[in-house]
Image (cartoon, coloured by chain):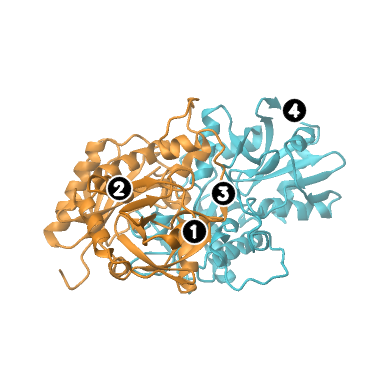
Chain colours: A cyan, B orange
Amino acid sequence: MPLSPATPIILVVEPFGGSTRRHNPSLPLVYWDDAAVTRGDGVFETLLLRDGRAANLERHLRRFRASVKLMGLPEQAAEHWRKATAEAVEAWYEKNDSDARCVWTLTRGRESTGIPTAWITVREVGETSVRQRREGVSVMTTERGYSINEHLPGVHRVTSGTPTEKKLKDPAPWLTVGAKTLNYAANMAALRYARNHGFEDIIYVDDDRVLEGATSTVVIVKKGRRLRTPVPGGDILPGTTQAALFAYAEKHGWKCREKNLWIDDLFSAESVWLVSSVRVAARVTRINDVKLPAPANVAEVEELITRALAE
Amino acid sequence: MPLSPATPIILVVEPFGGSTRRHNPSLPLVYWDDAAVTRGDGVFETLLLRDGRAANLERHLRRFRASVKLMGLPEQAAEHWRKATAEAVEAWYEKNDSDARCVWTLTRGRESTGIPTAWITVREVGETSVRQRREGVSVMTTERGYSINEHLPGVHRVTSGTPTEKKLKDPAPWLTVGAKTLNYAANMAALRYARNHGFEDIIYVDDDRVLEGATSTVVIVKKGRRLRTPVPGGDILPGTTQAALFAYAEKHGWKCREKNLWIDDLFSAESVWLVSSVRVAARVTRINDVKLPAPANVAEVEELITRALAE
């Protein structure tokens, strides 16, 4: 591993043809009139690069393309992003042998051209993520401050992928709740708040119902090799890492279910995890004032997730 | 007025000392790891430049500094932004004599430096705004898709400025609802939806209660020279142009009040307006399927708003 920080890789992607060009990371990239900068109007995905490949690539690709569709951005060919990501992976491993954080971004583009902007970045996994994988995180529970109106037509269908009887002709304005947009200011504010209060992360709750982390999915481990996660959809973004974990664990003797979770379920679980693409899995060591001691099978759970991402 | 599009002015502002430098608008401005681009983590204000000055400057400055505080960004000295704006105004009117759209942006800055990024842009007022000033807009009403939990401590106080008995020590994570952040993806999606359905703008409603436009404040004119606007706070951003209008109109024989408005109030009003800094005032000519005929005093209302901004 290099001692000085690794140089990030920036790959600009042409949003229609998929051709790429390297961009110097020490120069500005985005124009002043790009919708990403003026309105946060774009979508992204964050992937882990590990062992010379992008982990969980197909699930990220599916969610990315679903976000693109929800936001009414031009359809993105899967093969273009696979190819561009492979180039970015190759560029990273030419100079490094460590894990890396890869981000795909697609914005509505410059006001003056109307052409979407797309790029891929690759950089080191932050020290904080590495430490939290090892040591876990203390979390506080907090309300989001708003409630998604689940009764609106289409919200459940679009965010969870479940078909409804009534077919909607057009995506409705409120349906950006199911897309992974650049609008993360509130989540970032919640994290700052938690850090100012001696916590490292948060779990959003709606009264007693458990939603998700600021940038992660909540997974609990229950006695008898059982995994549970809150049902995605509405104000819970479907988690790609959780999905990979559940798919792998099911094949290896675990019982996995999406199920409404309540705060009490967190306290009665064997262990509670925040699962996301780059930090991968951080065990929750404290919730508000309650310590959660490490169970005997911590290493087994960690290995399960690691193997799921190597599939 | 020049026949070719006017060259935009970009002024980068040093966020602590306030010094400025011109930036070439044909070159990228923002780095790939800026929080504006990765998380929509920043705040902005849009001002009208008219008759050689920034209209309604002090109200924008107040809201900007309130947004900065809510988001936990470094305090911005009013005199730095006054001075930088004056430079931008001067640069614009050296080459142009028309109205212009001026935007202030402050972001949490690059991940690699931790130093906020700030800049001012000035460009032409779009043709659409100019046409809608003249011809008005057809609007559809739509739900936001989420509800702000008004019962949470502090929400009302922070978004409306009204003091509460219980003093909160720290800003809470949910309080970004009162800040004018870059997280406008949902509003932009709602506008696209409206345009795909033959409308030019939207009015957000919560059941029958009127909230605001996508990027504007709703103002209605009632018989007897009365102006009404929904009470700001919670999910209604306080409007700077509406505030200027009310302050001026009160001094000139109008009765102005912030008051809950219902959809029926729109239909029974003399006229309904969407008020914002650059488009200034667009009369609503249709709401969903109902046409709103122009009242006799349209010109009087327009002049009232124009004069308010010249104060």
Circle 2 sits on which residue? B246
CA distance for labels 3 and 4: 37 Å
Within-10-Å neighbours for mark 1: few <14, some 14–19, many 20+ = some
Nearest to viewer (mark 3 / mark 1): 1
Within-10-Å neighbours for mark 3: few <14, some 14–19, many 20+ = some
Tell if the residue under mark 2 belongs to the same chain as the one under mark 4. no
Q: Is residue B259 left or right of residue B7?
A: right
Q: Is residue B244 left or right of residue A48?
A: left
Secondary structure beneath label 4:
loop
Circle 3 sits on which residue? B147
Q: Dot 2 falls on which chain?
A: B
Residue at the spot x=75%, y=28% of the render?
A293
Nearest to viewer (mark 1 / mark 4): 1
For the residues labelled 2 and 1, say whether their Cβ atoms are less than 8 Å apart. Answer: no
Q: Is residue A209 visible?
A: yes
Tell if the residue under mark 2 belongs to the same chain as the one under mark 3. yes
Observer-nearest residue: B217 or A199? Answer: B217
CA distance for labels 2 and 3: 27 Å
> Closer to the N terminus: mark 2 or mark 3?
3
> Residue A65 placed where, x, y %?
58, 65
CA distance for labels 3 and 1: 18 Å
> Residue A36 placed where, x, y %?
42, 57
Which three-letter amino acid code belongs to the residue tagged 4? Pro
For the residues labelled 2 and 4, say whether their Cβ atoms are less than 8 Å apart. Answer: no
